[in-house]
Amino acid sequence: MARRVFALFNLFLLVNVPLTFAQDPEDPPNHANSTVPYDLPKTAKYDYAEVLHKSFLFYHSQRSGKLGPNRRLAWRGDSCFVCSGPNGEDLSGGYYEAANTMKWGLPLAFTVTQLAFNVYAFGDAMKAVNELDEAKEGVKPEEYEKWVPMGIQHPEGLAYINSTNPSSEILGETAATFAATSIIFADTDKDYSTKLLGHAKDLYTRATTHLGSYMKSTHPNLKTVKEWYPSSLYYDELAWAASWLYIATKDQQYRDQADGWIAKSQDHTTEYSWDEKLPGAYSILFMETKNETYKAGVENYIKTFYPGGTVKQTAKGLAFQDGWGSLSYAANAGFIMMTYAKTIGYQQPNATKAITYAAQQLNYALGDCGRSWVVGFGKDSPLRPYHKSSYNSFIDYPMRGKDNGAQGEDFLNSDTLNRFILYGALVGGPAWDDSFKDNRANYEYTDK
């Protein structure tokens, strides 16, 4: 999902570093556990500030509820008009999931945590290109669990997470969201920051008091999310939450608890995503403490992408960790590498290596492979992203007035271009051979 990979676009506002580094020229170009040689450009190869700006536009396309005066896309209007829980909870706000009209707790909360992490790590870069206010506006968290576009109720309804239906990963990730966001507002809106931190502590307490995963829930309204977003474990979300709470409070108990949860997650160190948070926990704790144990944790993650590691590269240089959303995994890795480089100092040899690898991944996405993978940016950018509202079957006849089933069939199988440009969306990515199918039916390529 493009929400996850937005992180990488921020950080190359920092990279005007006159460094070059190439991988060992003896490495084979396209074999397991190998990397493709790359020289770090001495000057910016693409307009990274433009990419950052358009990435923010993507999040405007995903917003739910009343959009207010900051609506920046003419084709997006208010939605989720009848969006409340059985106890009157306002569930109208937040972001929709990827191409669709769902709002699910774990991936949604991670999105906002990551957006806050972007500001925490690289807010200075955003400020340099006048995007910091926009970044902070996009991370004001709201609590919600369901979707209701245009007043149409989802057949599954909603599910409460509580002591009898626990989900330590959803509550843990949401606690991380509130704690991370409290940090970036601490200097500009103290009351709001304090309120967020209170929510973070409360949710973390609930997550650790009633341990459990939604994957074991029998609640019928969690059936689809278990299929679409199966959680691997919840200890990493608790480590992630405790780490952010430590940074927000400087309370040693949270660091101690983070260390305990990390110890329970040690076999989950090779992926950073909506599901796997351990590399992120190591990263923020290393940034905060400069502790060698946390540094080693970050480095062990990074080494999975270097020669001898487990992540292969395509012939044109993309780190191919998973066939679905290959670009997002590569971008997330690049982000962690850049936080590591900033923490140890950009001029250090290990930083040079990390910066180079991260630059290779970002520049692949922006055009080095012969095309751009970011909608509305660069050469041959995707024209048919798998995204329902930017396609909008109802705007033209003969689909106007048709039911959702007919509209869905048209959306999936029509060759019609998306009627509106989904600026800033990073599509799923190529196949292992760097090929791409720009159609919605092959959504493993064109989903966000």
Image: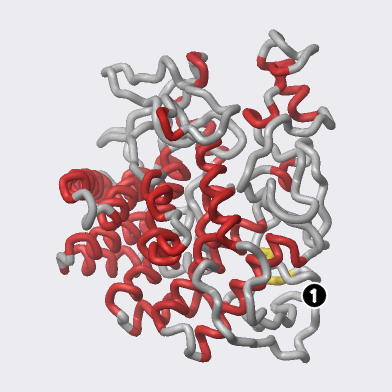
Q: Is residue 332 left or right of residue 411?
A: left
| Mark 1 neighbour class, 10 Å CA radius: few under 14, some 14 to 19, many 20 or more | some
Q: Position of residue 141 (x, y in %)?
A: 34, 41
Q: How is the image coloured?
A: secondary structure
Query: Compared with residue 298, is residue 85 higher up or lower down, i.e. above or below?
Result: above
240 vs 166, nearest the viewer? 240
Query: Compared with residue 370, is residue 167 higher up or lower down, i.e. above or below?
Result: above
Q: Quadrant of the C terminus?
A: top right
Q: Position of residue 237 (x, y in %)?
A: 37, 55
Q: Quadrant of residue 440?
A: top right
Q: Is residue 354 left or right of residue 285?
A: right
In this rendering, the count of numbered labels is: 1
Describe the element under mark 1 as helix, strand or loop.
Answer: loop
At a point 24% along the width and 48% down the height, the residue shown is 200
Residue underneath mark 1: 30
At a point 75% along the width and 50% down the height, the residue shown is 381
Query: Compared with residue 276, is residue 209 higher up or lower down, i.e. above or below?
Result: above
* Residue lying at the far top of the rendered structure: 401
Q: Quadrant of residue 401?
A: top right
At a point 71% along the width and 65% down the height, the residue shown is 364
Q: Position of residue 413 (x, y in %)?
A: 81, 29
Q: Position of residue 196 (x, y in %)?
A: 23, 46
- In this orientation, does residue 309 appear? no
Query: Which amino acid, by three-letter code, is at mark 1?
Result: Asn
- In this orientation, does residue 307 appear? yes
At a point 48% along the width and 53% down the height, the residue shown is 275
Q: Is residue 324 left or right of residue 8?
A: right
